Each structure stands twice: as structure tokens, then as C-alpha cells.
Image (cartoon, helix red, strand yellow):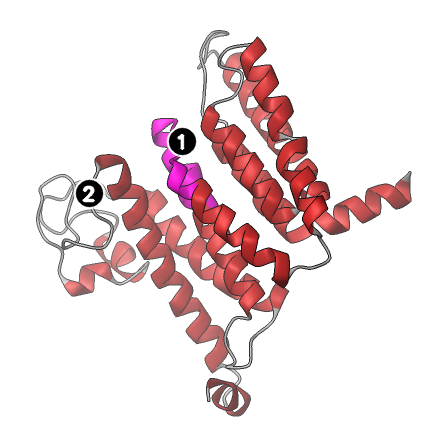
Amino acid sequence: MLFDVFQQYPAAMPILATVGGLIIGSFLNVVIDRLPRGESVVNGRSHCTNCGRVLHAWELIPCVSYIFLRGRCAGCKSHIPGRDFFVEVIGGAAFIGCGIHYGCGSFGFLSMRGTVMLIYFGILLVAALIDWDTQIIYDRFHIFILILAIANIWLVPEHGLIDRLIGALIISVPMLLLALVIPGAFGGGDIKLMAVSGAFLGTGPVVCAMFFGLLTGGAYGAFMLKSKKLGKKDVFAFGPFLAFGLALAALYGDQIVTWYLHFL
């Protein structure tokens, strides 16, 4: 059993978690890169998007290959986005963070709740970066989160069914109404993301998520207007800021709500 191995060799757990997280981050990079181009994320060899050269196995080692290659393709020497490196790092950090925050299961690996949260964070990261590039949040992401929300009914019973139903509506419905009154105020993907995430997280956390999303998105918009990089009629992807707020709320939303109610 892995649990016995980790007890005998405590250092093995963080090492294995880091490696596992880096591999997950590498796969998320594949999804981020291929999905908008209509390519399969499971079939086909990894290749340079500039010259089309199929990558060797050593070029696929997360983080290490990027550092060794100095962020450039070994063939055509084209620049490899630094974002790819950081997505892999985030994958490793998320795996370790979920293990620390949600504990380990009977096999010594992530608990079921930790596994569900890790998948949720992965979906948020992919959706945020694709939205940043294309201003599109694919419906498949909403479906996956909805499935996780159903699983969370049993995994997180402190948020009951009614609380989750309210959570699904309390932010998404006002967003929808505002989008109908002011065309372009929110995209349909943003609205659906908050609806399914409200069902996943519950009422309090999704309200916190919207607050943080508006705070960070508003600050970014104000900066871009101030620096004249965007005009008053220009739009930018709001999904990444919502995803940041949702990730923060998933970790600390209940504590923030409790603190706020005590503060009142």
C-alpha cells in the first residue's frame, strides 16, 4: 500500500505529489493549446506549433525540458511561451496544496474530496487561459463542473441541496439580467460558469468568488483604460478573473463568510 510506503519514507509523498502535479500541468498545457485549434487532446504526438516537428520524449519532461531548452524549440528555435512553464508549476503546487488542505485517502494519495477539488482547479485554469486567448468558455467545462457539483453533494454535505440551488442562481441570474439590459456586460460562458460553480461551491463561497472577480477584473480594466491600452468600448475576457475568485473561494470561501458574519 502507498500509505505504508509514505509512512516509512515521508519524503516520498511530496516528491511523488510534485511529479504527479507537474505531469497534470503538462497535460493541461496540451488542452489549452489544442482545444481552440480543434485538435484531439488525447490522440496525436506532441509537436512544435511553429515548425510541426514531433517532440522527443526528453522534450516533454515538465519544467526541466523548458529550462534545458531555454524556452525555445530544439528544432526551429522558436519561442516557447513562458506560460507553459508556469502552468506546469501551478499543477505541481495545486497537487501538493490539495493534499495538504484536504488530506490523503486510504491509499495514502489524495482524498476523494481533494481529487475533486484538484480537477475543479484544473478546469478553472484551462477555462481561464483559453478564455484569455479566445474569449470563449466551452460548454464542456460547464458540464464537467456540474458533474463535480453532483459528486460534492455527498462529499461536502455541509452545503445542502437547497444551498447549492441558491448558489447556482444567486449570481448567475443577476448576471443574465444585466447582460440582457446591457449587451456585452457578461458573456454566456461567464454566466454559466458562475451557475455551475455556485452549485459546486454553495451560496456563500460563490458570492465571495464574484466579489473577488469584480475586484480584480475591475482593477485590471481600470489599469488598461488608464494606460490607454483599451478604449471605453473595448472588451476583455472576464473569465480569468472569475476563475481566480472561484479558486480562492473554493479554498477559503466558507472561512471568509464566517469571518464576515462575525464581523457584522
Q: Residues within 10 Å of mark 1 (few under 14, many from 20)?
A: some
Relative horizontal placement of residue 42, taking residue 191 as reference (left or right): left
Q: Quadrant of the C terminus?
A: top right
Dominant secondary structure, magenta: helix
Q: Which mark is residue 132?
A: 1
Q: Residue at x 26, y 63 (%)?
A: 61
User: 5 or 166: which is nearer to us?
Assistant: 166
Front residue of 249 and 74: 249
Pointer 2 and pointer 1: residues touching (CB < 8 Å)? no
Q: Nearer the viewer, mark 2 or mark 1?
A: 2
- Asked if 150 appears above or below 141 in the picture, the reply is below
Image-based side of 125 in relation to 74, left or right: right
Q: Choose the circle earlier in sequence order: 2 or 1.
A: 2
In this rendering, the answer to whether 14 lies above or below 244 is below
Query: In the rendered image, which quarter is residue 194 located in?
Result: top right
The residue sitting at 50% across, 11% down in the picture is: 183
The percent position of residue 186, horizontal first and vertical second, equals 52, 21
* Residue drawn 17% across the image and 54% down it: 43
- Give the residue number, with chain letter if any, for mark 2: 39
Residue 37 x, y percent position in the rendering: 22, 36
Q: Amino acid at mark 1?
A: Trp
The residue carrying pointer 2 sits among few (fewer than 14), some (14 to 19) or many (20 or more) residues within 10 Å by Cα, namely few
| Alpha carbons under labels 2 and 1: distance apart | 19 Å
Which residues are drawn in magenta? Answer: 124-141
